[in-house]
Image: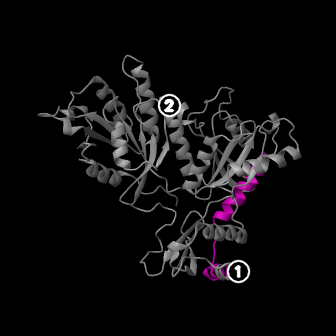
Amino acid sequence: MSKKVPIVAIVGRANVGKSSLFNAVLERREAIVAREAGTTRDSIMAKATYSNQDFWLVDTAGMKDAEDEFEFTIQEQIQQATDSADLIWVVVEANTAISEEDRRVAKLALKSKKPVFLVLNKIDKLRGESATFERLGVKPIFPTSTTQQRGIKDLLETTIEMLPKASITADSNRLHIALLGRPNVGKSYLFNTLAKKQQAIVADRAGTTRDINRSVVRYKGQEIELMDTAGIRRAGKIERGIEHFSVLRSLAAIEQADVCLLLIDVNELGVQLDQKIAGMIKEAGKGLIIVVSKWDSAEGKDAYTRDALAPQIAEIFNFVPWAPLIFTSAITGKNVTQIFELALEIAERRKQTFTTKDLNRWLQTMIHSHPPAGLKNRQPKLNYMVHEDDNPIPAFKIFGSQTKFLHWSYKRFLERNLREQYDLVGTPLQLWFIEKHIPHKHHDSPTKAPRR
């Protein structure tokens, strides 16, 4: 069984308050995944949480007006949104008569056969009776005011009732690998080389792949599904329309993957967006391999150059020091087979089991060799640890007292040594420090963000 974070898309014509609704649901800025400058909104997507249920919230703001190719743009955006979303919010203005654009949005959303809610926004500005929005054919209807926070709770409660709590993966024995990165870094070339067939469109022009291309191959008796994603552009470079959903589908691929390949161009190192994508993969708790592509085009490509570049790349990705690095060329086939080998090894490491006896023997060894320091009269003590064996990534609970005074460097010390002890290369892991006197449930996952 594997959980896929469901997707809620906010759609509607321009200036109906989609971005205000987006921000009202989030209530915070730190969850923002991507930004785009030069528009009336400052966010396009984020992972939201309500009543212990996570979901991706997508703002489709930025649709063009009718006189500016509205028909083309709105159909592209709604089509992409409905393809990816599990539920759709159609937003209209309560204080404005139904427009032809509202009708188009509602019709296209309903055509998707996905659950659709009508959000009657800006009811605080309503004077007198509202228009007969039932004519749009969308039910249920939720009157809301983002400025007054009216109706938001009812909307969210009904939404999470409709969202899938988990999707069952029938092919649970299949390894899922997602290829991610900026446009034109060679993802489709590598996908084709790995799949050994021309399923993806390969072009020199950036941004060719918009959907998730899939291919299933067998390697050493293991079925592997490859997922080639559209390139994730720098925030200011994300174009209106389908480019928004290229990012969304890359996020969806991360959620579906067991191991992610982050491709970076050997000729363009140190790009901030590469780091952001790695951070998304880490946050999702997925395996990660950093693939330096286009090695055939690098000047002076020899062992000396590779050895010189490796520390530089490691420093760029110092927040994921556990991710292995591999230099490839899809054109020459260099090290392509090694990608499969690494992915299989990482998948096995992620499924390791750890006995409580062995973990506590290791923990006591660490404490004796390097006792945790604290403040005066606030000495942290670590008593025992357990493995969360029902977690998709290696996750551990360490019980003790005064654990909130543990220094971050000591936590890093424990993680580094735990990785070395159990060869946990290529996967994030989670250490959760718990006060013994605080009630807890073993199935509460340490990989989920704290609830507000």
Viewer-side residue, 53 vs 421? 421
The residue singled out by tag 1 in the image is 369
Residue 179: quarter of image = top right
The residue singled out by tag 2 in the image is 242
Circle 1 sits in a helix, a strand or a loop, which is it? helix
What main secondary structure does the magenta stretch of the protein show? Answer: helix
Q: Quadrant of the C terminus?
A: bottom left
Tell me what residue is drawn at x 82 percent, y 36 percent: 296
- Foreground mark, 1 or 2, reads 1
Viewer-side residue, 322 vs 186? 322
Above or below, 283 relative to 377: above
Residue 186, how many percent across, how many down?
70, 36
Q: Which residues are the magenta region?
A: 336-362
- Taking the image as shown, residue 56 lies to the left or right of residue 236, namely left
Q: Is residue 48 visible?
A: yes
Residue 187, how many percent across, how many down?
68, 38
Tell me what residue is drawn at x 41 percent, y 78 percent: 439
Viewer-side residue, 174 vs 431? 431
Tell me what residue is drawn at x 47 percent, y 60 percent: 449
Q: Is residue 180 visible?
A: no
Tag on residue 168? none
Residue type at the position of mark 1: Ser
Residue 234: quarter of image = top right
Residue type at the position of mark 2: Ile
Say if the magenta span includes residue 347.
yes
Q: CA distance from mark 1 to mark 2?
A: 55 Å
Mark 2 neighbour density, 10 Å: few (under 14) some (14–19) many (20 or more): many
- Taking the image as shown, residue 197 lies to the left or right of residue 20, namely right
Residue 212, how many percent across, how many down?
57, 39
Of all residues shown, which one is farthest toward the front? 376
